Amino acid sequence: MGKRISALFRRSISAIKDHWLISMIVGALISWLLQWSLPSKAVDVRNLPHKELTCTVDYSSQMVTRDIFDGHLQVFYDGEEVKSPVINSITIENTGDRSILNEDFKEAFSIQLSGSKRIIRFYVTRSSDYSITEDVLADFSISGNILTINDFYLNIGESFTIHIVSDGKPDNIDCNSRISDIRMITTKSPQTGDKNSRIPIVTYSGVLIFLISALFIVIMKIVKTKD
């Protein structure tokens, strides 16, 4: 059995050497595989923005569920009637390498809960420093399904988490502002991010397996033709 495998291996190597097209394909596959699998050297890019603000939607959860509809049932939150109360948890973090100052805000920071009827209440549940909580609560406004915070101060790595109680579950949560040296605010959901990050790996693996299988079939046919 070992001799047969060894002979088949030698014939396969011979077939690759004799056919320049197969040699090129094998070389390209090996080169691509090495580039994809081996870690690349860090690239020093000096013109990237030094400030970054990340808005992470932690969760959006229904506070009351109704198995049976009853028009006489009323739900109240803090004394106010709500049709479908939903709690939305959002974390705002300075993920850059420079502080974000109050004067950096050229336009107020806003969070829009698209699809919700209105925002009932909002409060800060956690912050890196209590002064951040005071800063956020000092000047804010609610209009329909939009929460606006005029400005806040975040050192590098600092963050705060807010809970927004809305009437109706939002279809989408968007964070917007115009901040000095920040082109756009990064808005992300951990679940979506993890799912999307696996797509390229699965795609590349499938393509690689397909090419190797096709190449193996071609080599086997050439070896059998020689026999």
Image (cartoon, rainbow, N blue to C red):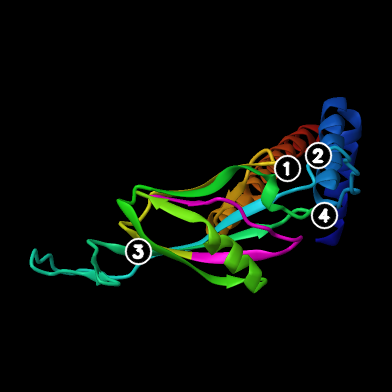
Q: Quadrant of the C terminus?
A: top right
- Whichever of callouts 4 and 3 sits on the residue coming sooner in the sequence is 4
**In front of the other: label 3 or label 1?**
3
Q: Secondary structure at mark 2?
A: helix
Which residue: 67% across, 52% down? 102
Judged by depth in the image, the label closer to the viewer, 2 or 4, is 2
**Amino acid type of the residue that numbered disc 2 sits on in the rendered structure:** Leu
Pick the quarter of the image with the N terminus: bottom right
Instruction: Count neighbours of disc 1 (C-alpha within 10 A) and say few if under 14, some if 14 to 19, many if 20 or more.
Output: some
1 vs 42, left or right, is: left
Up the image or down, 192 lies above or below 133; here it is above
Cβ–Cβ below 8 Å for labels 4 and 1? no
Give the residues drawn in magenta, as a range: 145-162
Tell me the residue that label 4 is attached to: 5
Label 4 amino acid? Ile
Left or right of 195 in this view: 49: right
In what element is the residue under mark 4? helix
Q: Are marks 3 and 1 in contact (CB under 8 Å)?
A: no
Of 32 and 81, nearer the camera is 81
In terms of secondary structure, where does tag 3 sit?
strand
State the residue position of label 2: 29
Amino acid type of the residue that numbered disc 1 sits on in the rendered structure: Ile
Residue designated by label 3:
86
The residue tagged 1 is 212
Spatial CA span between label 4 and label 3: 65 Å
Mark 3 vs mark 2: give the one in front: 3
Q: Quadrant of residue 189?
A: bottom right
Residue 143 versus residue 14 in the image, above or below = below
Q: CA distance from mark 2 to mark 4?
A: 23 Å
Residue 134 on image: x %, y %: 58, 67
* Residue 72 point in image, percent of width and height: 8, 67
Q: Name the mark nearer the viewer: 4 or 3.
A: 3
